[in-house]
Amino acid sequence: MHDFDFLVGNWRSHHRKLRERLANSHDWEEFDGTLSMHELMDGHANVDDNVFYTKEGTYRGVGLRSYDPQTAQWAIWWLDGRDPFGQLDPPVKGHFENGVGTFYSTDTLRGKPVRVRFVWSGITKTTAHWEQAYSADDGKTWEVNWVMDFTRAP
């Protein structure tokens, strides 16, 4: 239940994001942002407010996580501020092992099913690393398409 305690508070973030996913693209965009996270429901859930400062403009996103003590797993949902009345992404589900959190789901991209993977790693009191990857072949190969490096804000 305390796996995400490291993320409570305010962070600066640096992003590298592929412009096009699962298209053999090597065109990355980089931008900065912030994240502010706090716990909910006595630690059984948490939420973060993300601000992204892209070349196209500033936008926000919300990450919502909940912990299931029966399975010892987390579910993570994403709400993109560019379409706040759209659907929540299907939750990625998983857990931490040896300091690395790995979470999976199935979604669609351009009308085709894809596997989605989030990985949290490199976690210290002042830094953390997150990456998202997609797989079009049910997890045989993965394309990392978004990387975030976090530094605790003063």
Image (cartoon, helix red, strand yellow):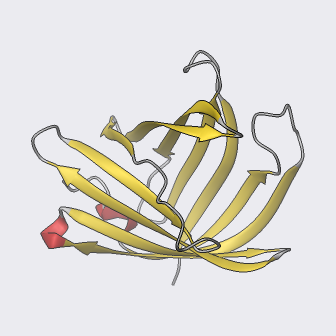
Q: Image check: 18 left or right of 100?
A: right
Q: For the point 62% across and 56% down, which residue is it?
A: 148
Q: Nearer the viewer, residue 84 or 91?
A: 84
Q: How many marks?
A: 0
- Residue ID at (66%, 40%): 109
Residue at the image position 80 percent from the left and 61 percent from the top: 30
Name the spot of residue 9 as percent of width and height, x first: 39, 77
Looking at the image, which residue is at 11% across and 46% down? 69
> Viewed as shown, does residue 70 lie left or right of 142?
left
Residue 60 picture quarter: bottom right
Indicate left or right for 15 with 139 as reference.
Answer: right
Q: In this view, which residue lies farthest toward the top?
A: 140
Q: Is residue 151 above or below residue 96?
A: below
The part of the image, by quadrant, that contains residue 33 is bottom right
In percent of width and height, residue 143 lies at 69, 32
In the image, 152: left or right of 142? Answer: left
Name the image quarter holding residue 47.
Answer: bottom left
> Residue 103 appears at what percent x and percent y?
41, 39
Q: Residue furthest bottom?
A: 154
**Is 56 or 31 nearer to us in this picture?**
56
Relative height, residue 120 to residue 115 (above, below): below
